[in-house]
Amino acid sequence: MSFSLPRFLRRTPSKSLKLYFAGRQIALPGPVDWDAPERDHLAALQQAIDALDEAAREQVITDLERVDQLCDGVGQLALRSVAADNRALLSRLLTEDSDESRGLIVLLEDESAFDHALAISYADHRRNGRSWSGYSVASPFAAAKDPQLLQVLEEEISRLLRQLDGTGRRLKIDCFDRQGPTTDGRLIGLITHYSIYAEGLPESQFEFERDDPKRRTRRPVHEGAISYDPNRRTLDVIAKGGKPARVGIAQSFARNILGVTDGIQPVIARRFALNRLKRPLTFASDPADGIKTVKVLLLRLASASDGHGRITIEIDPSDRTDICALSEQWFGDNDPLRRPEWEVSQAKLRIVFYPEPGKVREEAVMIELRSPNGSNLREQMRHHEIISEKYLARWGLIAGRPEG
């Protein structure tokens, strides 16, 4: 979803917006009554932002757009991971009730940490995607911190990219440590993150110079990442250029930073076995994990015979009957869930957790799975790892893994 200034302002508490303009020392040209009703002060605030001089307005839009990138589960976990060593900052984040407010606080208090959170979020959103390759590491090798070795890594990756597609003529790597999440949402263990910034091929675009459009040549920067977790013995590489680029980057990292030549092996991306949902499941779970109910709300099926037909079956969470029984009731002998030529390409599950100690409200998590391996699991802040690593396999929803 593209950035919308009105939407961002509506979702951000007035006190946080007021704190932002004070922290950036941006004097608004028009009066804004921060204590006025939301509709009144938001309209006045947007008018004041529009009336700023060009440089100040660009800074505001840029800042708020960057914060908006961290306003989901992945981004919020990234903010917590970069603030984990700063107890005062982490305490402030935990007391806020708005994603936007937490992002603004880190931006103002520690912009370097904020930039690291953006880099983490960028990589985590792309893990298991088209630009990702994963590797298992034979032993928990220590990552070298020698600046000279890092420079060698930069030079080798630059040379690799230039040979593959002409990019990477200039390349810079930013390295930092951050804490990784556990299954219950805590942060523990250090992960070393390497942000890769490679120069792309020149692009010619129109830009306004005063009142007239002028053609300018720009050299965009392509972002990539290497994430090394010695505790789990995993290495993730995010990069454009296809698999050859990622293989070369992984080999260079292993050779120069880990000091090994044959200690890593590629990880095959998991594939979902969504056809398992064409029949009722019990969704058994361990009491300690606090799962109360699991309900399939949506199944989207594709025709394996012609590749063009689509059928979507969707039910309401309040329906007492499961989706398989309702599909049979609706379609009778033509029930697509009983026809082998219709295969499940997408599913939506609603998982309800019992209230946590000291709380009275249950928590509902919506899980979306798309064939072959797409999902929203990384947007779930607290339970995504339990579900993805434990129960999807147990429920038979990951191909090639035994149930149980």
Image (spheres, rainbow, N blue to C red):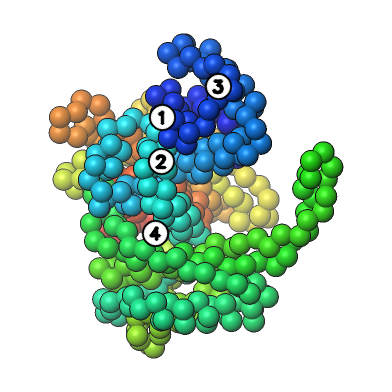
The quadrant where residue 304 appears = bottom right
Q: Amino acid at mark 4?
A: Ile
Residue 316 pos. (x, y %)? 44, 28
Q: Residue at x 32, y 52 (%)?
A: 81
Residue 132 pos. (x, y %)? 49, 65
- The dot on residue 398 is 4
Q: Amino acid at mark 1?
A: Leu
Nearer to us in this view, 158 or 383: 158
Q: CA distance from mark 1 to mark 2?
A: 9 Å
- For label 3, the residue is 45
Q: Amino acid at mark 3?
A: Leu
First reached walking from the N terminus: tag 1 or tag 2: 1
- For label 1, the residue is 19
First reached walking from the N terminus: tag 2 or tag 3: 3
Q: Marks 2 and 1: in contact by CB < 8 Å?
A: yes
Nearer to us in this view, 170 or 227: 170
Query: Which of pointers 3 and 4 indicates the residue nearer the eye?
Result: 3
Q: Marks 1 and 3: in contact by CB < 8 Å?
A: no
- For label 2, the residue is 108
Q: CA distance from mark 3 to mark 1?
A: 13 Å
390 in relation to 10, above or below: below
Quarter holding the N terminus?
Answer: top right
Q: Secondary structure at mark 1?
A: helix
Q: CA distance from mark 2 to mark 4?
A: 43 Å
Quarter holding the C terminus?
Answer: bottom left
The quadrant where residue 233 appears = bottom left
Query: Which of pointers 1 and 4 indicates the residue nearer the eye?
Result: 1
